[in-house]
Amino acid sequence: QKEVEQDPGPLSVPEGAIVSLNCTYSNSAFQYFMWYRQYSRKGPELLMYTYSSGNKEDGRFTAQVDKSSKYISLFIRDSQPSDSATYLCAMRGLDNYGQNFVFGPGTRLSVLP
Amino acid sequence: EAGVTQSPTHLIKTRGQQVTLRCSPISGHTSVYWYQQALGLGLQFLLWYDEGEERNRGNFPPRFSGRQFPNYSSELNVNALELEDSALYLCASSLGTGGRTDTQYFGPGTRLTVL
């Protein structure tokens, strides 16, 4: 079993739809969770960062963490064509030393006008 | 505040040549990470430097190497280039404290093409 698994995609939705992107993980030592957005041929951009179970909202984006189920989600409301990108989940443990950041493989999202 | 910067943006080399990529972290960040992202694939961890020392290394051959300078900038060197080294090379930096606010911020990447 891979340490972090992510919905493989690609995912295509109409403009205005609610998008749900999901990752599961196996290592209970992971305590910090991130979502990155990567446009084609660009570096990943940090979207959301959370370190507790529950929801964190930022504009149209909501990050949800369920540590008991080892499951994280990113919801995008009122999706826009500009949201078309690859979304990467990432996580790490309590102590940076000896613990790399681990990234999911990414889910490619296309929002169609 | 300036973000992570990388140079050059694009590079074309031939098989067998050597290449050096450069990265400047965000001011105040002591950790630098290098990743390889081949076209259509996920991030593959290469190297992690903190406070001038190599902390961890991914599953790459020894011809991938690097270093971190006293000002926390970093170089990635790739010797004896092979065609499959063609990829986007991404650098990221973080505070390196392991604390709650410590997360990675990425640069724009260097696109390497090996012919």
Image (cartoon, coloured by chain):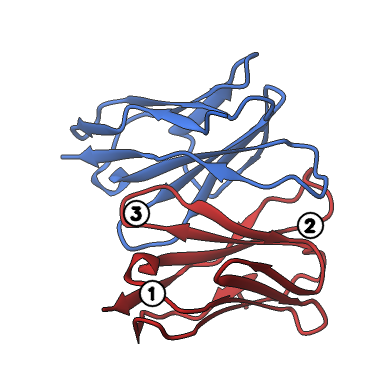
Chain colours: A red, B blue
Q: Which of A83/B70 is in front? A: A83
On screen, residue B98 above or below B2: below
> Mark 3 and mark 2, same subunit?
no
Residue pointed to by mark 1: A109
Indicate the chain on which mark 3 is placed. Answer: B
Residue B67 position, x and y percent, is 56, 23
At x 26% / y 78%, what residue is drawn?
A: A113
Q: Which mark is residue A93?
A: 2
Q: Amino acid at mark 1?
A: Leu
On screen, residue B74 above or below A36: above
The quadrant in which residue B112 appears is top left
For marks 1 and 2, give the CA distance. Answer: 28 Å
On screen, residue B90 above or below A22: above
The quadrant in which residue A60 appears is bottom right
Quarter of the figure with the C terminus of chain B: top left
At x 51% / y 79%, what residue is drawn?
A: A77
At x 35% / y 68%, what residue is drawn?
A: A84
Q: Amino acid at mark 2?
A: Gly
